[in-house]
Image (cartoon, coloured by chain):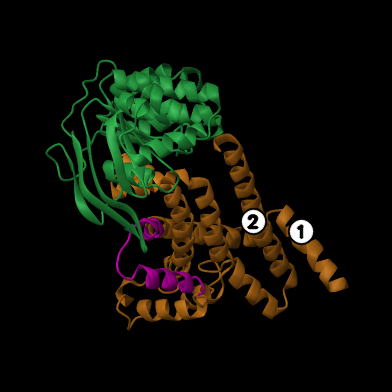
Amino acid sequence: MDTISQSFALALHMVAHLDPRLAAIVGLSLAVSVTSTLCSAVIGLPLGAAIAIGRFPGRGPVIVALNAAMGLPPVVVGLVVYLMLSRAGPLGELGLLFTPPAMVIAQTILIIPIIAALTRQTVEDAWTEYREQLQSLDASWLQSTLTLLWDTRWSLLTVLLAGFGRAAAEVGAVIIVGGNIDGVTRVMTTAIALETSKGDLPLALALGVVLITLVMALNVGAHVTRQWARARLG
Amino acid sequence: MGDVEISVQGLPIVASRVDVVRGSTLVLDGVDVAIAPRSRTFILGANGAGKSTLLRVLHGLIEPTRGRVTWGAFATRPRGHAMVFQRPVLLRRSAAANLLHALALCGVRGREARRRVDQALTSVGLEAMAGRPARVLSGGEQQRLALARAWALAPEVLFLDEPTASLDPPSTRAVEAIVNDIHALGTTIVMTTHHLAQAKRLADSIVLLHDGHVAEHTDAVAFFREPGSAAGRAFLEGERL
């Protein structure tokens, strides 16, 4: 118990004094996770909306596949991205392996199905309500999509947070394609795994505290924003 | 819109031998109807008679299973027809922004759009609500806003699907007055309703549906004086009872 309480105290001290090592890891984690969430949003939001509104052969299987892809094993995604980016792989010449962009690619692949599938569900619910009105107004497919994405923006904020949460908490893929190189590709989750195995519990705990606080703060923020929007916009 | 010319290019609307099948149910059965320019046609009938389906067919929202609909010389619905639904569908934005969105979809933007929004909101008595979120308005205000949205578009034809079904008498009267004002600008009105008194007040033509058939399509005054069909007589008799 002493070790745990001492580790906690040290961890809080590091957080309170913005320990440079801690700050560097947290900064890189945020940069990678935010970037991959944005990349996934650019692809996943319109993709989900298109599937929600579109009626095409094979739509049902596409939805099933998309939902199933939400559970993609990170280590498998990491392995595939590793093979693509490794020197012998088709994208090896880009020299991205063991760099933050490689981690962004892996996380983006992991998050796209989450954002697309949840967007599909959210937009489809709205489409059920708005379809006849938008058709009556002669809205094109693109205009309908943009209208629905905008009108469900507060719900989609939660969708993006779910994606960010997955990215920030993910360890399997980024450790394979990033390599957990100190000062280059070491993020919170990989650092926690490493420091725990080394027995450096204070740093691991400090990172854990930051990670949990960050995810909780974002979710509280999203919840408050949604409540405000619901009260104000109906 | 008082100074926006309303065309009649998409008129008359003619439905010829229209069948609509939903699952194994024949909702509309060989319907022949013609909607004349600048008329106020009311579609009456009991629940399940096919009123809302016929309205959607005439607006082009539902494709007939058999038969055809033409809009003037067009085989597909031309732009410039609007519809107000029983439960108004409003976007999660301000009242004015709802109108601006509809106008933008029709290619009307900028100062002209703003002018039409102001005029339409004033016409339905919602000018003070322009900045209010549309979805927090009362039921009656929401329906008036939906009418304002249609008004701003200066539609050639306005379809209304029981727009007063869930409104109280004062709100119903307000909606009826707005419908009359829109008609006075040259817009053709096609409306479904359960209220015979409302049809009597507003309609100049009645389409009576009975089990998916057109039981009669006649002048409103003649219909309420002496229906020409057994279904019409039974319908009026049922209302009196």
First in residue order: circle 2 vs circle 1 = 1
B23 or B220: nearer the viewer = B220
Q: Quadrant of the N terminus of chain A?
A: bottom right
Q: What element carries label 1?
A: helix
The answer to whether mark 2 and mark 1 are in CB contact below 8 A is no
Identified at 58% across, 60% down, the residue is: A24
Above/below status of B30 relative to A179: above
Q: Which of marks 2 and 1 is in front?
A: 2
Q: What residue type is labelled 2?
A: Leu
- The chain identifier of the residue carrying mark 1 reads A
Q: Is residue A53 above or below residue B223?
A: below
Is any atom of residue A28 visible in this view?
no
Rendering quarter of residue A80: bottom left
Residue that label 1 marks:
A12
Question: Per the image, is A54 magenta?
Answer: yes
Q: Is A229 contained in the magenta span? A: no
Residue position for label 2: A214
In which chain is the residue bearing label 2?
A
Query: What is the x, y in percent for residue A75?
Result: 51, 79
Q: Above or below — where is A121 with respect to B183?
A: below
- At a point 30% along the width and 50% down the height, the residue shown is B62
Number of callouts in the render? 2
**Residue B102 position by quadrant:** top left
Please provide the residue range marked out in magenta: A47-71
Q: Where is residue A92 in the image (x, y as percent from the top left)?
A: 33, 77
Amino acid carrying label 1: it is Leu
Chain painted in green in the figure: B
